[in-house]
Image (spheres, coloured by chain):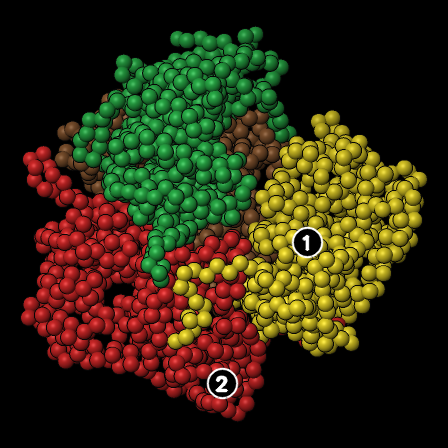
Chain colours: A green, B brown, C yellow, D red
Amino acid sequence: MKNIVIHKDDRVKFRNNMNYCVGTGRMGLALQKEYAEQLKLVQEKIGFSHIRGHGLFSDDMSIYHEYQDAEGRTQVEYNFTYLDMVMDMYKELNIKPFLELGFMPGELASGTQTIFYWKGNTTPPKDEERWCNLVKATLIHLMERYGTDEVVSWPVEVWNEPNLPGFWEKADMKKYFRLFEITFNTIKALDSRFKVGGPAICGVDDERWIREFLVFCRSKKLDIDFVTRHHYTTEFPENAGHYGYQKLSEPQLGFDNLKTTRDIVDEFREYRGKEIHITEYNTSYIPNNPIHDTNLNAAYIAHQLSRLGDVNESYSYWTFGDIFEEQGVPYTPFHGGFGMVANGCIPKPTFWSFYFYKRLKGECVYRSDDAIVTYDEKGTYHGIIWNPVYGEREGKLELSFVLDADKEKTYCMLQQIVDEETCNPLKIWHSLGEPSSLAVEQKELLRDAARPLIKAENLPVDEDGVHLNFDIGENGVTYFELRPVTVSSDRGYSYERAYEC
Amino acid sequence: MKNIVIHKDDRVKFRNNMNYCVGTGRMGLALQKEYAEQLKLVQEKIGFSHIRGHGLFSDDMSIYHEYQDAEGRTQVEYNFTYLDMVMDMYKELNIKPFLELGFMPGELASGTQTIFYWKGNTTPPKDEERWCNLVKATLIHLMERYGTDEVVSWPVEVWNEPNLPGFWEKADMKKYFRLFEITFNTIKALDSRFKVGGPAICGVDDERWIREFLVFCRSKKLDIDFVTRHHYTTEFPENAGHYGYQKLSEPQLGFDNLKTTRDIVDEFREYRGKEIHITEYNTSYIPNNPIHDTNLNAAYIAHQLSRLGDVNESYSYWTFGDIFEEQGVPYTPFHGGFGMVANGCIPKPTFWSFYFYKRLKGECVYRSDDAIVTYDEKGTYHGIIWNPVYGEREGKLELSFVLDADKEKTYCMLQQIVDEETCNPLKIWHSLGEPSSLAVEQKELLRDAARPLIKAENLPVDEDGVHLNFDIGENGVTYFELRPVTVSSDRGYSYERAYEC
Amino acid sequence: MKNIVIHKDDRVKFRNNMNYCVGTGRMGLALQKEYAEQLKLVQEKIGFSHIRGHGLFSDDMSIYHEYQDAEGRTQVEYNFTYLDMVMDMYKELNIKPFLELGFMPGELASGTQTIFYWKGNTTPPKDEERWCNLVKATLIHLMERYGTDEVVSWPVEVWNEPNLPGFWEKADMKKYFRLFEITFNTIKALDSRFKVGGPAICGVDDERWIREFLVFCRSKKLDIDFVTRHHYTTEFPENAGHYGYQKLSEPQLGFDNLKTTRDIVDEFREYRGKEIHITEYNTSYIPNNPIHDTNLNAAYIAHQLSRLGDVNESYSYWTFGDIFEEQGVPYTPFHGGFGMVANGCIPKPTFWSFYFYKRLKGECVYRSDDAIVTYDEKGTYHGIIWNPVYGEREGKLELSFVLDADKEKTYCMLQQIVDEETCNPLKIWHSLGEPSSLAVEQKELLRDAARPLIKAENLPVDEDGVHLNFDIGENGVTYFELRPVTVSSDRGYSYERAYEC
Amino acid sequence: MKNIVIHKDDRVKFRNNMNYCVGTGRMGLALQKEYAEQLKLVQEKIGFSHIRGHGLFSDDMSIYHEYQDAEGRTQVEYNFTYLDMVMDMYKELNIKPFLELGFMPGELASGTQTIFYWKGNTTPPKDEERWCNLVKATLIHLMERYGTDEVVSWPVEVWNEPNLPGFWEKADMKKYFRLFEITFNTIKALDSRFKVGGPAICGVDDERWIREFLVFCRSKKLDIDFVTRHHYTTEFPENAGHYGYQKLSEPQLGFDNLKTTRDIVDEFREYRGKEIHITEYNTSYIPNNPIHDTNLNAAYIAHQLSRLGDVNESYSYWTFGDIFEEQGVPYTPFHGGFGMVANGCIPKPTFWSFYFYKRLKGECVYRSDDAIVTYDEKGTYHGIIWNPVYGEREGKLELSFVLDADKEKTYCMLQQIVDEETCNPLKIWHSLGEPSSLAVEQKELLRDAARPLIKAENLPVDEDGVHLNFDIGENGVTYFELRPVTVSSDRGYSYERAYEC
């Protein structure tokens, strides 16, 4: 039994930027109704500031077009019809894009290599000037529609995971750096207030890429605004049918890896202290690993959220919802997609980990591998406790806190509990026979079942403060709040007498 | 430990008409926004067919007016502006009125006696013809607006609780019978398809009233369509400040009392078998007894719902929501009002008792003082278990069922649990210090906390069938469903492997 | 034919504060659903900042209560349940109260005199201290709920029309001044940032009241924040049945009267330049004059809106909607109520006068008794023209403008036309036989018919600029916009060829 | 001046089935939010029973998949995730599919030929059995999800326009007949209640196709349920940039052509009198002809709607909305798309032609090339008049009716006018400079401007009846209603006195 004493004046390192950015399926999918409904739910309950995904320039967005004029010369025209629809919807939902420039429009591509079910072209431009014009025209259009001051506040990242040959032909580093250079210069020439960064790599050969990228930028005198990378914490998958299964890594390995990136950046005098944005993270990096739908995922991510701000400016959970087609259209509502929300607008347990972090207010007074606690200016403690059970770990987690408190006051202890017993839509769906098509009533049932259990009670204060005892279920995440309350019983009202029948 | 064996072909007496009718605060309150929102919630989740309350003819509905014409003669005119607003809203929410004719418009009253904070006039009409014209004009107006066939399907009850002197001056039986007679004849003359009944009495001197009423009707050859009475199951209140506290009665006393009414009616050859409608029931009959907000109330009412259909056609819970002003405007959201829904659109535990009974499908295969079970044509069992703890009763309730089942099938056991731990908004509000004004976030918290805990699992079948074990918390109400499911796992999907990390 | 030349650099006096405040039926009615729907429509299309009406302390709000404690002493308690509901709704609709303190709670009143169908008590408090405590408790409650900084920004006016004996017993000036004094001091003691004013008089004996009020304030050293009065522009009514009919006054009489008030205030050194708020205005001051529903009213009010800002800080149209009960519940949807919106959420012509003034942007470049024109920084002219036909006036109004314009540009002329032919729901209702109960389809038809006719065309520019010719129908109000546009035809698109079939 | 006398007992041929079916962009687009919003608008205001479009089996619906099993054998699996989303949305909007079976899933295709920007594969199946299994599996899935009785009421058409080589490889008649045969037999074997038909041809070589199709069906003893064809009424386009321009045909040519089809079908004893469904019609058959957005289109279609029921069971306007990608994503909101609704949810004039026909009630008493009039059992006349100006036609249309009426009654004449002056969003957009991206306010302005002008007046009755005079603007469509009304003025109310100021 752990027994932890916390004082309100304790100060512990913790940077909570969990709602700066969230990932999404490709931009073309943002036209869908179900996509918008899932994002609306996420924004109402959590509220992210930015959203990042692939496919801005892919063919289903239909932005870039070439045609022959009367004289037979090739001309270029742009179509922003769908881009406007997507951006209008984002604006309505109070979320800004974190622009990822890519992939290559078919008509501008130098090759035919594509990635994913939806065939994003991943080859360099056949014409650098036209690429730069495309970037410029798109940004100018957005500035005209949404206002210059607004649009320059949208971060811009060049391409995605060029260190993988699937995402960038042959993972050709030199060609990526060239793309970055011309893009960076185009944007800064348009308006120097834009924040532009890269190289958006994942964890393959990452140290070399980061270092070479910065060497290149320095050589070209590119005053980049931030460095980006991804962060996944599972091993290689074993595949079976439509699915893949992976082991989770020990979190510390990942934190160490992130620290290495930080250190590399800081080695460069020109870039020391530059912001690092993790523009994608999750447990598994495949959209068909059932872990994403589990309480285990929620508990593992709760831990991540307590640490990812340590050396990074932001970290973008990949992804907010399950409208996502990289491996094709999913066959069932619970198919191990990346989303916090399953199709049918059903929040997964991980959704609540974010919801809970959103509620952490004030200064951090305690942080461990199991829990985090903050204290705000109204005298309220907020805490989150998690208990992911995987690898060697097992069983329940018992924790006991003693929180510094004022003996003159009445305290209300509020808990929101997400664990395998209280908020486990996956298990309910499984028990129903894993239906691929949900009836309307089943959707409603699953949504109703996908909510934390909420409890409250008044706790006494003794000399040491208030004693809290937690018994966290397997893969549970519990949020708690201990707040001083004013008791203002109405004339003649007695809660106890209500039961004296 | 009780151990109960249930076969799907068992047949047990049970009539489930819980959603035929529900009570409401006076009609003038139906203009309010919060009223409409609470009723919308009730209709979406439960769905009642009819709604009944007081005040159709009271002054705030502004229907009846007298004026002097140019010749100085008194003329009458009607104003249906507010009536239309209320009825349109009811129609939109898919609920029909169970019309209660009363109270007396001030300008038509013979006296000045009023009842309640909102001053309903409870004296006989000063002019019988004008009363009959008022009734007729109102019904004709409704028939023109909503269609004759529709309006004749709305039951009509004459006045409310004339056996109490507060509700009917001096509880003058003779004058009530006269009012009934002229009203009945007026309506039947308008359209004989109307169903008309009375005497709408509560449990004071009730046997005499029922008997005299029927004697009177027989003497006047009034072929009444139904008999109405009320049913409350608490003793006299002790008052303190704004509140009253009462002991609950043993349910059997109430059931016996209802049976007596049935027997009296059946004594009359002319009225034998006539429908009896309980046009009001609840635990306490005062709108300021905190019991209404408790889990105890939910459990007690769950028991009532298993029995009230035995000798009655319908029974109307008094009331659906807490927009209600008989004792004045409530000071706090949880003030012991009659409603299933507290102000702020917060469902009280009792709301779920109704929600659960709505889900009972098929034939009754088991009924006791603790539980009821039905079995439907799709092979699903539905059950409700309750555990009200009051008087001498105490503690948890353990129950064990063995349900007849098919060994070839997979069964999903689904539970929805409402008890003091899982769904107790009153306790949360109490823990927050009993705030009289709820902040927006507090309302949201209380709504989120006011939901059943939902669980599901697959249960094995052995020779005896499926074994269910319940451990019902104090004042708990649990709904369960045992249904055969088709397992249709997607290619490669494994629920178990999701956790093998 | 008038021919008017306008230059973009012309500057003409005009203060457009038409959406600072709007009037409302008594606060208790703000609980109603239809009220909220009408206000929502008004806020979406026009958007007022403040709302002012009677009845904050009247009995249906149920705020003030006295009771005897155990020792038999009288105690006071407050109930803010309904006040919260109203204020929450206002906040949701983005409108702040302009608080009018009144009328007297029955239990705090010194007499029994009431006003209106809804019986507002209009007598002085029986106990000054309790009145002050009531004011203070209410403001403190609001500050706790909505934030101190927010609530101190809500203007406070003491009572309503004390110069009429119906609104203030015997129109007792001395007692009103005493009420003002103690109320003013109570509020300023609570938070000196509150803005407090009076005497909220109408145009009866008004000059004497204003002058005496200021003499009194000066004598008591009350540093009042503003002076308030009302402004109606019709003569005495002739009554017939439920209705009253009145002649409209010549507008100049009213403007002169307002100027007199301004002059009186400015005579006082201590109050020179103090803001004057017209806390009520309309054509007729009775809620049953059919003029309120006409196009004539819209045109007359359009004129008023061009002038009311001249010597006043604000002017509050009485009222936004027709949920209003001073003379009882209206018998029909078009009953000559004050509202811009008829019951059934049907905008009246006057609604659009406000909608049009909302669209006036930039600096005023022209103002006459028929029209007003502004010019904004984007190079767009906005104008409103009106043509009320009453008294000696008659027929159509022809107007011709020449607007300074850039020959290099293309101009789009946009018109929105409200007149007896294009937007006259009253006439349609009349033609339908003046139904008192609107069927759902009739409501929809009337709403559809209650919209301006919208037209646009491109106009040529010559040496003088752009020539606009208007032919305004009887009682018409036309809004126009002349804006330079960028022509960006898509490749191959021809509007003209679309019709070459 | 035409002068037309109409008696209420006249009976004229007219079959009004305008809302049986409507066309749509490919099914994959039905996932989009804007698509659903446009369809919602159409359903609320018009209300179609069925919807038909291409692409059920195209790759973006992702239904058909092949994979290799562990033994290396090819297996088939189906994915109904997106189909469910679309069908659920249709159900929510109260519209049923008119199923068109096609195009070919890539993995089931025998060739690589595709049509349209969105690449629908238009080759025969590589394996007939798998095609039949796909059809069967899809229908079975729908029956399980939506109920057998419901789904068998959805008509089924096999493929689209096989008489064009673009839609069916080489327009190979024999292969189409084979496809029809196996599909027909598969469906009828599943449930003989299904209604199945073809050949869904357009007007190219149509007589031969119809005849050969029926010969084939007869030879195979296929008891088809209906015959389908398309109907467009423009000549070949001249292209310019993204657009095409065409001349309208004289309507009679089209009506004659439809009659020929009817005659051919009736030549076959086995198929005499079989229903013919026009599963597509419009003026132009290209989705980029600006005519679709004009008032001319509305007037031309109003004429068509008066005649298309003459020899056909139904006729499906191609299409309800402008979410449509056959030629790519449109560059601007008004791009000459097929829809009744432009992107941004802006109704085009043609929308109102349908809205007006929806309002025709009762029996037809008059029909000409300019107008149609019906008379219903409530004594109301409903009429539509149109005035398309194209080719040699020109100018305004004057029409005068004398309608049989009751001298004792009061009549209300209601008009809804759509013409180039009153309801012409295209002109407003054009005047604004033809912006490709609409600002939020511009969308609102265009929606507000895209509504009929509504007028009403009371008309006198003389010996001949009621005289109506119409002056229909160029390309105008006017709906009128002449209804007897009950005048029920409230006590003291005078419409006329309202203006006597």
Judge the density around disc 2: few (<14), some (14-19), many (≥20) Cα neighbours within 10 Å.
some
Residue A34 lies, in percent from the top left, at 36, 45
Which residue sits at x=12%, y=53%? Answer: D110
Residue B306 lies, in percent from the top left, at 36, 39
Q: Nearer the viewer, residue D162 or D62?
A: D162
Dot 2 and dot 1 residues touching (CB under 8 Å) = no
Q: Nearer the viewer, residue C429 or A203?
A: A203
The quarter of the image holding the C terminus of chain D is bottom right
Instruction: From the viewer's perspective, tell me whether residue A256 is left or right of residue D164.
Output: right
Residue holding disc 1: C362
Residue D352 visible? The answer is no
In which quadrant of the rendered view does residue B405 lie?
A: top left
In which quadrant of the rendered view does residue A119 lie?
A: top left
Q: Amino acid at mark 2?
A: Glu
Determine the chain carrying the residue at label 2.
D
Q: Amino acid at mark 1?
A: Gly
Examine the rendered structure and indicate whether residue A182 appears above or below residue D152. above
Q: Nearer the viewer, residue B415 or D363?
A: D363
Residue holding disc 2: D398
